[in-house]
Image (cartoon, rainbow, N blue to C red):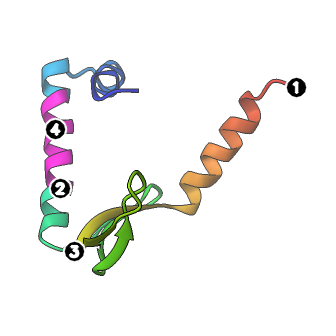
Amino acid sequence: MTKADIVEKVAAGTGLTKLETEAIIEGFLNTVIQSLREGQGIEIRGFGSYKVKKKNARYARNPRTGEKVFVEEHFVPVFKFSKDFKTAVDKGMKDNSIE
């Protein structure tokens, strides 16, 4: 599913126009990115939480050449699904499975 598909589904479910829905979704995504850039975590109850994790500097190997390369310290966004979210997906997949 793409962002355009999400916009279409949300617009159909809310009665908003696709243009309005796209602006809302774009605003949400930009808010998440900006908050993480500022080092703030985000928790959406029943859905999950976003946070930034620090990865220490280390040496790694180039898989093609086997050459040792230095990877600088960097930060990566991580998302942890809530238990409710995991349970809903599991139940949905089990209910929709063909036996």
Looking at the image, tell me whether mark 2 or mark 1 is earlier in sequence order: 2
Mark positioned earlier in the residue sequence (3 or 1): 3
Q: Secondary structure at mark 3?
A: loop
Amino acid type, label 3: Glu
| Disc nearer the start of the sequence (2/4) | 4
Q: Amino acid at mark 2?
A: Ile
Residue 31 on the magenta span:
yes
Q: Which residue is mark 1?
A: 99
Amino acid marked by disc 1: Glu
Tell me the CA gap for discs 4 and 1. Answer: 40 Å
Q: Earlier in the sequence, mark 3 or mark 4?
A: 4
Q: CA distance from mark 3 to mark 1?
A: 49 Å
- Residue 38 location (% of width, % of height): 12, 71
**Residue 52 quadrant:** bottom left
Residue at image coords 18%, 74% = 39
The quadrant of the rendering that contains the N terminus is top left
88 or 66: nearer the viewer: 66
Residue depicted at x 20% and y 46%: 29
Work out how far the residue at label 2 is from the one at label 4, CA to CA, in angstroms. 11 Å
Q: Which region shows up in magenta?
A: 22-32
Task: Tell me which corner region of the image, top left, top right, bottom left or bottom right, holds residue 99.
Answer: top right
Residue to which mark 3 is pinned: 72
- Report the amino acid beneath label 4: Glu
Marks 2 and 4 in Cβ contact (< 8 Å): no
Residue located farthest toward the right when viewing the structure as drawn: 99
Rate crowding at label 4 as few (under 14), some (14 to 19) or many (20 or more) other CA atoms within 10 Å. some
The residue that mark 4 highlights is 26
Find residue 83 and name its label: none
Residue to which mark 2 is pinned: 33
Q: In this orientation, which residue lies closer to the viewer: 87 or 36? A: 36
Mark 3 and mark 1 in contact? Answer it, CB < 8 Å.
no
